[in-house]
Amino acid sequence: MENLLKRKLRIGISACQFGSKVRYNGKGIDLTQCLGRDRGQFIWTPVCPEIMSGMGVPRASIKLSGGDGFDFWRGKAIIKNKEGKNKSEVIKSGAHACLETLERANIDAYIFMEGSPSCGVYRTSLKNQRLGNPPGVFGALLLDRNIFLISSVDLQSPIRWWDWKRRLVAFVWVKEQNICSKDSLKEIWDKIKYVLYELHEEETTKLKNKFHEVLKKEAIDNVEFNKIKEDFLTLLRKPAEIENIKKYLWKNYIDLKNKEGIIVENVFEPHILRNMTHIAEELLGVEKEARKANLFFKSSPINYKPDR
Ligand code: SF4
């Protein structure tokens, strides 16, 4: 079982974050430009539920009333525009059209614009203006489908993006493994356990105990294998704390240095203050050297080498 992912990942994205000027006021920004060369490592599918609803640009802004996006789909909340018109039905059609597009595109993840009453997931307020309760209408559909979700704000932070990318790559790699024996389960665990501890020590310790209990059994059925796989995937969705990223970067770097002789300039101990960009450069530096020497880097266990 090689720790390699060669398939080019497919990412859906709120179109206004991909440079399309589709917001109600005709604005849009291309945050994928912040990713530099990483931008070319993915296949992108931009969608806009409000545009697909038939409302053009410019348009009156909309707001969720009477609940959150889940309530909306249960018929307990509505979408109104600034002129007081009920836009629920067209928004439903627009959101479904986008979801169908993303399903056809077979996306591995979706990058959403936080704050929108359509695409927002954890917040539906913009510039202190409340536009309903989160998630938004489209955000609720994405959550319901259990899609790997990334906030577009994090594309602007090199360290946050590094964290998202390594977890997404590990997530897809785990998802695509066929776990059909104790050995295959153990092999996966051995590759991703370091990242899981970094993400959530307490939950990973519990998972480890559960995992060892399962391994003691004489026979394990597919349902049990899949349950553990789901537990791995759930943990991989969680962003890491910056303090933990720094701590494990140092630990894993020292491990590579002592055991394999890898030397990377300007990698600092966790307590030394430096900015996020510097930490991201340290991570990328160690990752690059480890990959070059064909070594395992515990902070980023799966090697993503997409075909062109
Ligand atoms: S947040 Fe979503 S619905 Fe609003 S403009 Fe962007 S893509 Fe369209």
Image: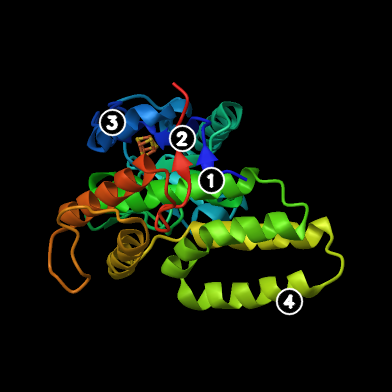
Measured as percent of width and height from the top left, residue 112 is found at 40, 43
Judged by depth in the image, the label closer to the viewer, 1 or 2, is 1
Residue 179 vs 14, above or below: the answer is below
- Distance CA(mark 4)–CA(mark 3): 43 Å
Classify mark 3: helix, strand or loop: helix
Tell which of 232 and 211 is nearer to you: 211
**Where does label 2 land, which residue?**
11
> Do residues under tags 4 and 1 come within 8 Å of each other at their CB atoms?
no
Residue at position x 50%, y 58% from top? Answer: 236
The foreground one among 15 and 132 is: 15
Q: Are marks 2 and 3 in contact (CB under 8 Å)?
A: no
- The residue at which mark 4 appears reads as 213
Q: Which residue is mark 3?
A: 37
Q: CA distance from mark 1 to mark 2?
A: 21 Å
Which three-letter amino acid code belongs to the residue tagged 1?
Asn
- Determine the image quadrant of residue 259: bottom left
Q: Is residue 116 visible?
A: no
Picture coordinates of residue 124, whole percent (x, y): 37, 54
Q: Residue type at mark 4: give it.
A: Glu
